[in-house]
Amino acid sequence: MINLKFFPSRQIALYVARLFFTRSFAVLGGLVVILMTLDLLGTSSQILAHPGNGDAELWRYVGLRVPQLITRFLPFAVLLGTLITLVGLNQHSEIITMKAAGISAHQIIAPLIIAGLLVAIVNFGFNERVTTRASAALSAWEAVDYGAIPPATRVHSNVWVQNGDDLILARRVSGGGGQVRLDGVTLYDRTGGTLHRIVDGRSGLWRGGELVLGDATEFLVDTGQQRHADRISLGRAIRPNEFTLASADPDEQDFPQLRQSIVALENAGRPTASLRAGLWHKLSGPLSTVLMPLLAAVAAFGLARSGQLFVRAVIGMALGFAYFVADNFALAMGNFGAYPPFLAAWGPFLLFLLVGETVLIRTEE
């Protein structure tokens, strides 16, 4: 008779889930301690090289770095924790006992998948509330060589803005709101990808809602003529906030902030494909913990006394690490624009979901 229940008994589900949690978080703790120690050994000299830095700054670095390590290596820890759990159950013939009681392979793995989903939810929340802020603070601290972080300024350098087909380069942008000032402005006037005019201005200010270049030179590509003017208006289509938008880093912004940054950058005509891939990966990344029990399930089945348990564990580990390699490769291709953002973030997840399910079905047969 076929057992159509998704879970085994309540006692078995809680027992397997408890083993999964304890082993996964034990592995995570060990990984974070070892990696943080190695990282600190390599970075402490740079931190202490700044005058006035001491033990407090070292502990500050640890506090900012540990959330990054937890977020990055939690899926690895879940993979290893799952393998340890399943290998232990197999070695003690608990898997065989469950199978003899009529429990299917999917039912044995089901508590681990649900536990992995809970870990994914916690990981997502931790990344949104803690890791993004720690990453932003650490990046700002590293930019000043672990010294005192100066107050934030509203000065940007070499800002490119796309206005329709036209491209505008401002070598220096200062101020905010309606008081934005541009210095060293170059307009590349294009139609259908063909360059028709180049306008250089020493400065750029908004007057009556129009961007006006001062001390400007206009070069007409079609005729080769050049003229100088005290003022050249570029019209109202160009808005001040298009120049004051800072570049966004998916690792340093939470999900709502990153969505707002993408919309603002798109309105300014800036490319956002890599940011959209990072946005989707904020969901697919934590959900990788759901895949790990499925990929490691090959270590759970097969007789331990057959001598192939170690080989099965290696295969499960290889499948897990292959997913991480494919995930990083897809993100890199998404950043280069070779993959669409959705495919770059979700492609490896969906692919290895099918691979894991195929392996489990063949194991059950």
Image (cartoon, rainbow, N blue to C red):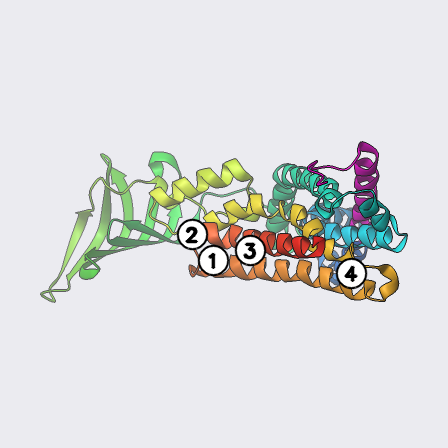
Position in image of residue 64 (x %, y %): 70, 46
> Of tags 4 and 1, which is closer to the observer?
1
Majority secondary structure of magenta residues: helix
Instruction: Give the residue at mark 3.
Output: 351
161 horizontally vs 100: left or right: left
> Of tags 3 and 2, which is closer to the observer?
3
Position in image of residue 277 (x %, y %): 49, 50
Label 1 with label 2: CB-CB less than 8 Å: yes
> Of tags 3 and 4, which is closer to the observer?
3
Mark 3 and mark 2: Cα distance apart in space? 21 Å
Instruction: Give the residue at mark 1.
Output: 335
User: Callout 1: 10 Å neighbours few (<14), some, many (20+)?
Assistant: many
70 or 242, which lies in front?
A: 70
Q: Is residue 197 visible?
A: yes
80 horizontally vs 175: left or right: right
Label 2 with label 4: CB-CB less than 8 Å: no
Q: Which mark is residue 346?
A: none
For badge 4, the amino acid type reads: Leu
In magenta, the rendered stretch is: 1-30
Along the polypeptide, which appears first: circle 3 or circle 4? 4
Q: Secondary structure at mark 4?
A: helix
Mark 1 and mark 2: Cα distance apart in space? 7 Å
Q: Which mark is residue 273?
A: 2
Q: Which mark is residue 38?
A: 4
User: Callout 4: 10 Å neighbours few (<14), some, many (20+)?
Assistant: few
Count of residue discs:
4
For badge 3, the amino acid type reads: Leu
Along the polypeptide, which appears first: circle 4 or circle 1? 4
For badge 1, the amino acid type reads: Asn
